[in-house]
Amino acid sequence: MPGADSPYDVVVWGATGFTGRLTAEHLAAAAGPDLEWTIAGRTPAKLEALREDLADVDPALAEMEYITGDATDRESLDAIADQTDVVCAAVGPYADYGTPMVEACLDAGTDYCDLTGELQWMRETVESYHERATDEGVRIVHACGFDSVPSDLGTLLVQTHAMETFGAPCSTVRANVSLDGGGFSGGTATSMVGLYEALEDDPALARALDDPHALVPEGHPDGSAAVRGSLPQYDHEAGTWTAPFFMAEVNEKVVHRSNALRGYPYGRSFAYHESMATGGGPIGAALAGAVTGGLALVDQVMSVDPLRQRLDRYVLPDPGEGPSRQAIEDGGFEVRLRGTGAAAEGGDVFTVEGRISSDQDAYGTSGVLVGEAARCLANGDVDSPLDGGVLTPASGIGMPLVERLREAGLTITVDDR
């Protein structure tokens, strides 16, 4: 557990970045006086400007004492970790800047959560720090934003309902993701560029991207094979055309890691599949084809170093940039999860449907997701068989985060059919 003598419950590190600011704004609006929290970053002038903006939300924050810290200055990161129960990290790309803070948190006995969707870095932290974090009871919880909370907690929600209602888990869960508006941030772009650069240096990473169990602990069974398709498909049960979803490669691995770390409550042959829903009819089919073709084109361009460099320099947004506030508020998403299984008694086939949706785009919602994850960790509000380790939202926090997100305004439902 975090230290009782820490002056802060939560420090948002990287608070002046694009998603870090959204996280700080959410805490300013939602945390109230019961949470002792502050912001941290590299540049005092930017932190002071952010503090002024946060004071417009909550006047009590006008006197907030921010902390300066640089990802390249380990002593400054130690100072941050030493002063808080939880570091909420929004400094990316994490493959470039995240490891020193993870190490600082381990040394300080401080819990940690972040927004990463960078598979190569998650593999690195699992291999390097999971055993130590487990032994020392420190929770290092990755993927607490849009990648991969809706997928991971949505599956936990569906499986919990299945076991409580039918006495058995779903053997498969299929998720369809619908996106409404939104945009693309510089941090996401930089992380994507970093992934393709890593693929050039590490051929094993390409195999990991295709393996839904790439984050499952070593020595555990691989489970069932992936069922992801690379072409548009029509989902008859959901009544929609689907296309490959660009974050499925990460989300599927996070869900399977959760199952393994929690002791396989979903079963050892459980399979999770995720796609993008594009709607029914000819328009849905056309959109599915366009999305599939667009993803294939991006993959080809990003796989060629000179083209990738030109795209990064002249087309992609710079770090710190992202969708406008209006685009965030006008956007939204919905993740529908459909689980199927056989009841423990009688063996009748059942279906459970879960839904997670937001009236903000993925970036605006990510600030809510990781902010509430940090609050859960700070309050010890977790339901997990694990006291520490390199964890996922479902294995590191669990169902209490679902309740917090409902209170924060997300629509989260589950029912059997």
Image (cartoon, grey):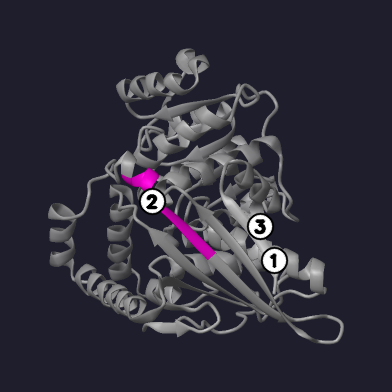
* Placement of 82 over or under 151, stated as above or below: above
Task: Give the CA distance from mark 2 to mark 3.
Answer: 29 Å
Horizontally, is 201 left or right of 124 in the view?
left
For the residue marked with disc 1, what is the amino acid?
Answer: Asp
Question: Mark 3 = which residue?
Answer: 395
Residue located farthest toward the front when viewing the structure as drawn: 281
Question: Badge 1 is on which residue?
Answer: 415
Tell me, yes or no, whether the two marked residues, 2 and 3, touch with CB atoms within 8 Å: no
Magenta highlight on residue 330 = yes
Observer able to see residue 65: yes
Q: In this view, does 328 lie above or below 85?
A: below
Residue located farthest toward the right when viewing the structure as drawn? 345
Q: Residue at x 46, y 66 (%)?
A: 177
Q: Which of marks 2 and 1 is nearer the N terminus?
A: 2
Q: Position of residue 109 (x, y in %)?
A: 63, 38
Marking on residue 175: none
Q: Is 105 located above or below residue 116 in the figure?
A: above
Residue 331: give its label: 2
- Residue located at (47% from left, 49% from top): 359
Q: Earlier in the sequence, mark 3 or mark 1?
A: 3
Q: Pick out the residue farthest to the top.
A: 63
